Image (tube, rainbow, N blue to C red):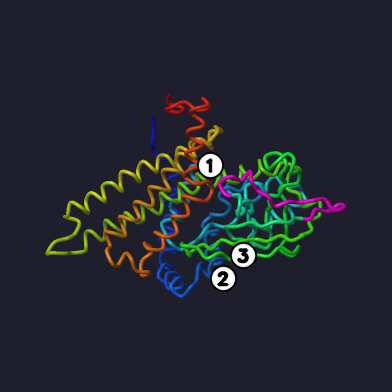
Amino acid sequence: MDFELSDEQRDIRDTVRAFVTKEILPLEEDFLRLVRDGGARLPRDEERRLRAKARQFGFWGLSTPEEYGGMALPAVTQSLIHAELAKSCVPFRFGGEADNILYGADAAQQEEYLKPTIEGERLGCFALTEPGAGSDAGAISTYARRDGDDWLINGEKTFISNGHEADYAIVIALTDRDKGAHHGATAFLVDREAGWTSSPISTMGSWHLPASLTFDDVRVPADKVLGEVGGGFQLAMRWVGKGRYVISAQCVGIAERCLRMAVDYAGLRETFGRKIGQNQAIQWMIADSETELEAARWLALRAAWDVDRGADARHASAMAKLFCTAMVGRVVDRALQIHGGMGYTKELPLEGWYRAIRAMRIFEGTDEVQRLILSRDLLRGHTRIGGHLA
């Protein structure tokens, strides 16, 4: 059994690490100042500059198929990259990406939505969650009814990432109430110009503000159906599935940065005449964090590995998300504690991470949903204890 990274994986990871160190980490001080003044993201011009520079490095479209100009990287390699990017509190992602379900678009839809999104000319959002349908996605009530050759959409979506900035939305709506969401929901590509409205939602973690979307007889032509009528729920689950192993990798990156900060500070800060790193209480917090971080790293990579080998990755992704999102909360909490009062200020990214990462245990499936998946798989015999090594 070989746990070594390949030469290619190591080279890619190290190149991303160098990019983060040179281009992104120097922006943290200005970004934190922006957050203190009420901002939540880099200025758009700065994002474009960084993405253009990253493209010069060769990083464009990590998961995008080569036929669309992307890198088509394996999931494990993507996970390594997401972990490196997450080590900075500056919200940045490489360009050239589009929602994975957009590749199911027909030729005309690809020209109008997929390709412009990859090039950064358009920004979309994925609208599934509703006020009464979070963990239970099958309970959605947003409805689309036929009106001649068009569809009219009515309903509300909530906690939608990029929902206030997007110029189009991928909306999952019921088209056959009798069949329910699992077989009677459809995905629609809906331009903002069609008439839906949005409003940002203030949250505990102010770095990434979601939005609520309102649809009031929003008219959508029949050629805006993404995939098949009635196939929307399956597309939605494909979208959610990818998010779980990516989130796990991001948790690993955040925790690694926070632990590094804690170790460095413990070696510098003095109280009662000695470095605080000499105190057993601090040493135990560092040791526990390192152990949990290493366990999380392998769970995250295992989930990505299942994706790469074509296995059903839902069980491994559920384990990874459940453990990694809890782990990062504990590691950030300990790092903040080690920093004392300084960790509680907005001068460092720790307090912002402390608030922001709490959402990771909620979106893309709550802790409770992950536990439901895991226990159900075992109780029904869909998965063996010990997985592929059993």
Element class at badge 1:
loop
Element class at badge 3:
loop
Q: Position of residue 323 (x, y in %)?
A: 41, 43
| Amino acid tagged 1 | Pro
Sequence order check, earlier mark of 1 and 3: 1
Say which residue label 2 marks: 45
Q: Real-space Cα distance between discs 1 and 2?
A: 30 Å
Farthest residue, direction left: 273
Callout 2 crowding tier (Cα within 10 Å): few <14, some 14–19, many ≥20: few
Say which residue label 1 marks: 74
Sequence order check, earlier mark of 2 and 3: 2
Q: Which mark is residue 267?
A: none
Q: Which residues are magenta?
A: 134-152
Residue 283 lies left or right of residue 239; in this view the side is left
Farthest residue, direction bottom: 37
Residue at x 50%, y 71% (from the top left corner): 39
Residue 7, compared with residue 98, is above or below; it is above
| Amino acid tagged 3 | His
Q: Position of residue 170 (x, y in %)?
A: 68, 53
